Amino acid sequence: MTDRPVPKKRPLHRAHVVRTEWLSPRMVRVVLGGEGLDAFGAGAYTDHYVKLLFPLEGVAYPEPFDIDAVRAGMPRDQWPRTRTYTVRSFDRTARELAIDFVVHGDEGLAGPWAARAEPGAELLFQGPGGAYAPDPAADRHLLVGDESALPAIAAALERLSAEAPDAVVHAFVEVADAGEEQKLDLAPGIEVVWLHRGTAPVGEKLVAAVRALGLPAGCDVHAFVHGEAGFVKELRRHLRLDRGIPRERLSVSGYWRRGHDEDGWQASKREWNRRIEAEQEGAAAEAG
């Protein structure tokens, strides 16, 4: 019998809200600060993420707070709720961590919290995780996502602007409407194609844009495709099977899935990704 791998324990950090800024009608930036960020490390990747912990109202947790102790000693229905968010930026010198939240009114957990966050409010989180940064040596870069992937795409484009301003970049971001576009500080040759969803299904316009994109045969494409799981699945298949992009040059994952909250999606995400990857890699092997 093979031992199961032991999950890597992510350090716990405490920070407080320094300020908030509405970037668009549906996205708010929360800037965190405090001594709790002294041990926080981010910068290697542009898709760094943190696990935000939201304690349940009326539940007393042990102090000092230890999420592993909570999970080992308290009923599951009393565990803090966890939400995963991208690190938009981290300034170690200023000791400031910025996280962008999509807000759908009172729907959800983290969005409403961010919309109402006041300076001084405490936030517990674990991390960072992450795995992707654009390779400056790639012939072309393809970055595709909906609002949930916009912070990571923006961070990647800013990295390219600083390290490889002459890079050939195809960046497609789907948002609800023109009001959700953001002004990014990028090199002159690096631009975002903003796609306005309107009443179309999430990701439909992204899939169409990528399928219509002309890419020279044999060029080295480094791709980042994240967002709603349905369109991510379709584009992963297209990029692997139709375009022949090697799996090691693809960073592809569903950040969320229609009809599921994060608790439900995270519980099934690993198996869903494993199954989809196995199916598509098998098809690629047969085609090749």
Image (cartoon, rainbow, N blue to C red):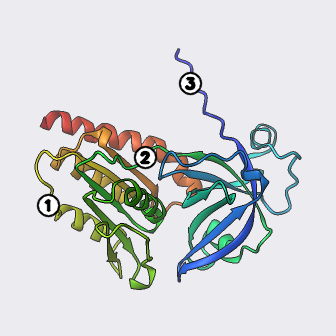
112 with respect to 258 (left or right): right
Local secondary structure at mark 2: loop
Q: Give left or right: position of 48 versus 112.
A: left
Q: Residue at x 16, y 65 (%)?
A: 212
Q: Nearer the viewer, residue 140 or 7?
A: 140
Residue 7 against residue 187 in the figure, above or below:
above
Residue 31 at x, y = what percent?
Answer: 66, 67
Q: Which mark is residue 206?
A: none
Q: Please, is residue 155 above or below residue 276 in the view?
A: below
Picture residue at 32% right of the left edge, 37% below the top: 278
Q: Which residue is mark 1?
A: 214
Foreground mark, 3 or 1, reads: 1
Identify which residue is drawn at 25% across, 49% down.
Answer: 237
Type of the residue with mark 1: Gly
Label located before the other in sequence (2 or 1): 2
Q: Indicate the position of residue 232 as horizontal and vertical percent values.
A: 34, 56
Q: Of label 3 and label 2, which has the lower sequence position?
A: 3
Disc 1 crowd rating (10 Å Cα; few below 14, some 14-19, many 20+) is: few
The type of residue carrying mark 2 is: Tyr
**Please, what is the three-letter code of the amino acid marked with disc 3?**
Arg
Residue highlighted by disc 3: 4
The residue where tag 2 is placed is: 132
Q: CA distance from mark 2 to mark 1?
A: 24 Å
Mark 3 element type: loop
Quick check: can you spot residue 135? Answer: yes
Foreground of the two, 172 or 146:
172
Mark 2 closeness class: few <14, some 14–19, many ≥20 residues within 10 Å? some
Task: Name the residue at the left extreme.
Answer: 217
